[in-house]
Amino acid sequence: MSPTQQPHYRERLWPSVGVVLFSLLMIDSVGIAFGYMWGFQRGVQLAVGLTVAAAIGTVLYTVDISTEDSGLKVGPALLPWEFVGDVHLLDKAATIRARSTEAHPSAYFAVRSWIPQSVIIQVDDVNDPHPYWHLSTRQPQALVNAIQWHKHQETS
């Protein structure tokens, strides 16, 4: 591949529609309960305020994953290509095990329960406290391909 054919990868881990709807249902429930106790207008004000706070929080704390010339960037963290080790694609069952019973407590996690597949990237740096990065992704094969392309470019 030429540099112009470089596989760039970018994904933002937005919540699913189900998560958004469930959150809105819970916010409305709090607004109804508060409104029953303190009046309809105050209940609506609380529900609107919580909805705005949830929307702002979602935008601010949704994780970006991207491949860049300097390395794999996940949120504010950067793993330089020279320290990227083996990459493992996980299906739904393996993802559940890897983020629960088989999880390493020092791993770097950017996992979202509403995204069924994930990727584990081994960290080949003895000074890094994280043995691997575990990332949720809706496009696991595209992420793996982009990482492998960059790793190949780093070793060439």
Image (cartoon, rainbow, N blue to C red):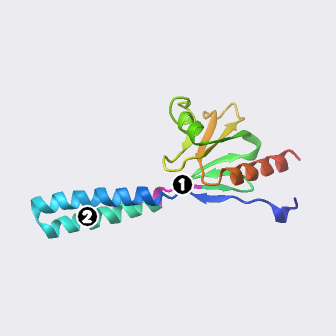
Residue at 34%, 66% in the rendered image? 52
Q: Kindly identify which numbered label has been placed on residue 47.
A: 2
| Tag 1 and tag 2, C-beta contact below 8 Å | no
Q: Kindly identify which numbered label has been placed on residue 63.
A: 1
Instruction: Decide whether residue 62 is among the magenta residues.
Output: yes
Instruction: Pinpoint residue 77: horizontal percent, then vertical percent.
Output: 60, 48
**Measured Cα–Cα span from mark 1 to mark 2:** 26 Å
Q: Which residue is at the front of the view, 5 or 33?
A: 33
Instruction: Decide whether residue 22 is among the magenta residues.
Output: no
Residue at 16%, 66% in the rendered image? 42
Q: Quadrant of residue 39?
A: bottom left
Question: Which residues are the magenta region?
Answer: 60-64
Number of other residues with Cα within 10 Å of mark 1, as a class: few under 14, some 14 to 19, many 20 or more: many
Please state, as top left, top right, bottom left or bottom right, where the N terminus lies in the image. Answer: bottom right
Relative to 150, is 106 above or below?
Answer: above
Instruction: Pinpoint residue 100: horizontal percent, then vertical percent.
Output: 50, 33
Residue type at the position of mark 2: Ala
Instruction: Pinpoint residue 106: horizontal percent, then vertical percent.
Output: 55, 32
Asked which secondary structure carries label 2, the reply is helix
Q: Quadrant of residue 65?
A: bottom right
